Amino acid sequence: MKIGRENRRMTAKEMFEELGYIFTKESNLDHEEKEHLFIYKRYHEPHYSEISFNNSTKLVAFQNECYGQHSFTLFGQETIKAIHQQVKELGWFE
């Protein structure tokens, strides 16, 4: 895991932002806070990637498109570390 400028561990949000993702938090207004979706999106024409964390079902969804067509999702070490950090911050390992 990378160490930030302040000599501390980076949050998942910081790690994803460093990788070019934008954080959004979407919720279902009919449910409690625990059922929120935490979504990171990255646009790099012609590619679109999205990583979604469903805090209710504890599932991670991946979406990747290129020229409007679904394509394989490949992750490097830094993205895998960010995904792990987000799951850890959401308390899924407890």
Image (cartoon, rainbow, N blue to C red):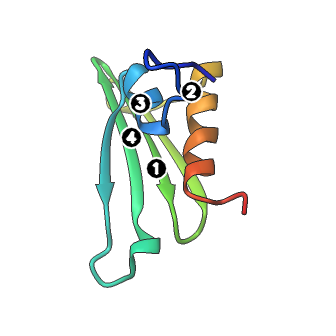
Q: Amino acid at mark 2?
A: Thr
| Residue 26 position (above or below residue 11) | below
Q: Amino acid at mark 3?
A: Glu
The mark found on residue 14 in the picture is 3
Measure how far apart labels 3 and 4 are at the Cα level.
11 Å
Image quadrant occupied by the N terminus: top right
Residue occupied by mark 4 = 40
Instruction: Say which label, 3 or 1, has the lower sequence index.
Output: 3
Q: Residue furthest bottom?
A: 30
Q: Is residue 59 left or right of residue 41?
A: right
Badge 4 element: strand
Q: Position of residue 86 (x, y in %)?
A: 54, 45
Instruction: Say which label, 3 or 4, has the lower sequence index.
Output: 3
**For mark 3, does the 10 Å Cα neighbourhood hold few (<14), some (14 to 19), or many (20 or more) residues?**
some
Badge 3 element: helix
Residue 69 seen by the camera: yes
